[in-house]
Amino acid sequence: MKAVEAPELAPAQTEPAWVSLKDDELLKWRICDLGTRIEGSELEGRIKQLYDELAARGLAFRPKCYLGDEWFSPAGVPAIAIPFYLAHPRLKALELRQMLEVEGGTPEWCQQLLRHECGHAIDHAYRFSSEQSWQSVFGSPETEYAPETYKPRPYSKGFVRNLPNWYAQAHPDEDFAETFAVWLSMTPEEWRSQYRGWKAMEKLEFVQALMEQTKNSKPKVSRGRQIYEARKLRRTLGRYYTERRKLYAEDFPDFYDADLRAIFGNGQPTWEPAARVMRKGRTALVSSIVRWTGQHKYTVDMLVRKLIERCQQLGLTIPPAPERARTSFDLAAYLASMVTNHLHTGRFKRSV
Ligand SMILES: [Zn+2]
């Protein structure tokens, strides 16, 4: 059928040559050759929303946004790097298959990350964290990121909540970025109501006063080097994913067989193999652990796979209903505590 009344469409964009390739072919492409751009992608609207929010709070500051290899704000530079794969649905699909999740892939998640990175970027622009008043509220920015000793208190009311993992507690710079993100996402009435009675309110009030002073002042730093720019990355996508998967594959300790036996009990050989049942429920199990621990999906998936393998080696079986429900809860709680303990005592790799 011929289109009689074509609605007003944007001029047809020619899709890049790699769009229709299968994953294994696409993985051979170098990132710099993909030609990804913010213009014309869904990121354009997300960045516009960030700028609109800054305008609504009366700020003249607008961080420069560019495509990089992951989410970050380059040290000392008032800019935000957004991972290049968010700039095209085909690359988002590849990211999902390679890493099991797309960080910032939904509008809401993307906005939370943009606000967080904007917190770093505005600090780089005005060098707030070098001031005594800032340090008396957030602490010294010279504090080392100490993954070995970083131990968040989930119940703490001294920190706001924007990103998962109680990320604000990781470092004074992260605390500021998270506080800024919350401040930017709500009206003062909203955050004053949501954080009533929280110690974190002092931080929000500090940011409120700081931004009031900043409104019309000129940034001390207005430019800088945009490191890890996607258009200069000569790595292939294949190499990029191999490296990231290696980074995310935490070396969780081996399972204690005694724990597994305690969970599954003295299984009857006629019962269904635990490994088979867990394989079927793996997606749901991984999602719920990710939801409550904030850990990377890829990392949790690796852990669950390892567990399934061990259950298979031990020949564990799982009881039928109604006992099966208790076993499943037990298992989920066990895994979540394992991830949390590991996360808080072992390496802490999130880098936003
Ligand atoms: Zn950060």
Image (cartoon, rainbow, N blue to C red):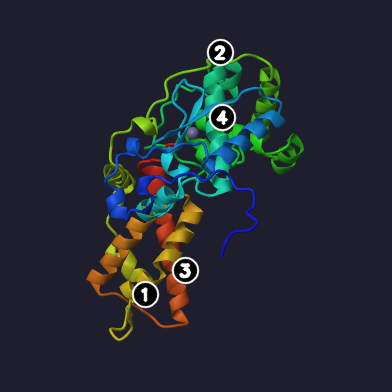
Q: Earlier in the sequence, mark 1 or mark 4?
A: 4
Label 3: element kind: helix
- The residue indicated by pointer 1 is 277
Q: Any atom of ligand 1 within 8 Å of the CB at mark 4?
A: yes
Q: Residue furthest right?
A: 189
- The residue indicated by pointer 2 is 220
Q: Residue furthest bottom?
A: 270
Asked whether, in this view, residue 23 is left or right of residue 297, the answer is left
Between marks 1 and 4 in the image, the one whose residue lies nearer the viewer: 4
Q: Earlier in the sequence, mark 3 or mark 4?
A: 4
Q: Are marks 1 and 2 in contact (CB under 8 Å)?
A: no
Pick the residue in front: 342 or 52.
Answer: 52
Residue type, mark 1 in image? Val
Asked whether, in this view, residue 12 is left or right of residue 157, the answer is left
Label 4: element kind: helix
Label 1 to label 2: alpha-carbon separation: 59 Å
Q: Any atom of ligand 1 within 8 Å of the CB at mark 2?
A: no
- The residue indicated by pointer 4 is 119
- The residue indicated by pointer 3 is 329
Identify the image quadrant of residue 196: top right
Identify the image quadrant of residue 205: top right
Label 1: element kind: helix
Q: Earlier in the sequence, mark 1 or mark 2?
A: 2
Residue 193, position in %: x, y?
75, 41
Between marks 3 and 2 in the image, the one whose residue lies nearer the viewer: 2
Label 3 to label 4: alpha-carbon separation: 39 Å
